[in-house]
Amino acid sequence: MIREVWDGGGVLGGLPNRQPLDLPPRPPEFAHDEQVKARWKREAADIHDLNSANLSKRLAISQRLWVAEKFAHEEAIFFPHSVDFRGRVYPIPSAGPNPQGDDICKALLTFAEGHPITDAGAGALAIHIAGLFGVDKVSHDERMAWFWANEHLVLDSANNPLDGTRFWAEADSPFMALAACIEWAGYTREGADFISHLPVSLDGSNSGLQHFSAMLRDPVGAKAVNLVPDDRPQDIYSDVAAKAQALVDQDADERAVAWRGGLVTRKVAKRPCMTFTYSATRFGMTDMIYQTLRELDATGQPHLGTADNYASSLYLSYTLWDAISDTVVAASTAMAWLREAAKVMTAAGQPIWWTTPTGLPVLQTYPRRRKDRMTVFHKNKRLQINLQHSAPGIDGQRQVNGISPNFIHSMDAAHLMAVANACHDAGIYDLSVVHDSFGVHACRVFELRSILRETFADQYSVDRLAMLRDELIAQLPEAYADKLPPLPAMGDFDINEVRRSDYLFH
């Protein structure tokens, strides 16, 4: 199906246009109005960037389809995984379809071994389909209600993907949604004995904030990221967007005007929220907001009325930063503590190492870099080449910037390993993982949900941040050990509440 859509010119289901977009025509005022000229150049540059990005996407899609067609008739293919210095796992090879790829990659892959779906598994599949269509901020019962109201469209997508309503193309992950629709059609034909091969996934609600909230026993953060049992899931991205919108609506700054009227949406807030715990900067958030604005427009042009979209994105980055910090105060405190601890380690000339809950030793060391500029002449042209070399000592800024994301990545990697081991012990041998997303056969989803809760609660039944501080003290010379700042205050959240949370991963 993907091949058919692609050969037909793309565009459908999130596929890029196989033809480049035209640059905007120059306005009549271009020659004598500098503001108009600057605006046109910005818009033309955006189209040029989009065409360049689409060229890369077109090449990637062609590669994935070629690999998929080459291995389509194999009984099974295998993905060994590598482990980085933090313990995070990545499939080998990364080229072509792989379990950690995009919508197309995941849609092309199924488990080689199938299991009867069962009626309970079919319910999990229905909830999964609702999530793929963006109906994932409501309770399981509401998702099921949405599914039954749209089942006829699901079946139409499966039976007439191109000649029907093309309901599947409206999903957040169109081709994964189409694969799930086809799986549901199989269940309606064969019933509970239908042999299902499709991975049905459970995803974390902002992994970084979940780990920080559990680590600090923060009741506010815990509720925001679904560590607390509730009858419906919390959505931190919508909460942050609402707070930022309220700040914008009250702000007299002229740059705030462009965002009024409810334009600070969940989609605009999501990327900054996701990267906050991974040492995102305000300038980085600016680029994320600006890119989101481009994606919201089919032509690749960012639009906020007549406002300068980049200046408006820069303004909102500060507002979103404040809204996020206000929502997850404890996480901000923990990140600040980690940065201060890294400064002490750097001042002592020490790299940083710690042990993850799985027993993996993690070494963070960023050596200083020396840049040399070399001038060469080629065909009567003078070229300058910058060469980088390792230099003695430790790069303090990179140590400070890296400690928060690396520590949290090591924690979610440890949780993944614990989940994989627990699944194996429970007889679940087919597992698809993307860091904080876990996929199993539909009939094993409820077992997986229990395993995710239990392993997460077990991991934070001890004070991980205090254990890290003890390890840092052991590495420091005596003169520096007392310079480590005191640990952030612990909250009163009961970590065992996680064991009852239906929406920890959902």
Image (cartoon, helix red, strand yellow):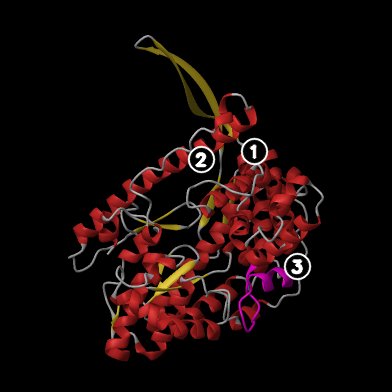
Q: Return the disc, 2 or 1, that comes first in the chain's sequence.
A: 2
Q: Give the amino acid at mark 3.
A: Met
Q: Nearer the viewer, residue 197 or 48?
A: 48
Q: Identify the residue under disc 3.
A: 490
| Residue 16 x, y percent position in the rendering | 38, 51
**Local SS, label 3:** loop
**Local SS, label 2:** helix
Residue drawn at point x = 34 percent, y = 45 percent: 19
Q: Which residue, as the protein is rendered here, is positioned at the far top?
A: 380
Q: Using the numbered discs, state the Cα–Cα distance from disc 3 to disc 1 in whole angstroms.
A: 28 Å
Q: What residue range appears in magenta?
A: 219-236
Tell whether 501 sits left or right of 179.
right
Given contact means CB atoms under 8 Å apart, are the residues at marks 2 and 1 in contact? Answer: no
Q: Nearer the viewer, residue 4 or 452?
A: 4
Q: Give the amino acid at mark 2.
A: Asp
Compared with 89, 502 (above or below) is below
> Mark 1: few, some, or many residues within 10 Å (few <14, many ≥20)?
many
In the rendered image, residue 220 lying in the magenta stretch gets the answer yes
Tell whether 1 sits left or right of 13.
left
- Front tag of 3 and 2: 2
Q: Could you tell me if residue 423 is visible in this image?
A: yes
Q: Using the numbered discs, state the Cα–Cα distance from disc 2 to disc 1 in whole angstroms.
A: 35 Å
Q: Identify the residue under disc 1.
A: 396
Q: Give the amino acid at mark 1.
A: Gly
Q: Which mark is residue 46?
A: 2
Q: Which residue, as the protein is rendered here, is positioned at the far left?
A: 73
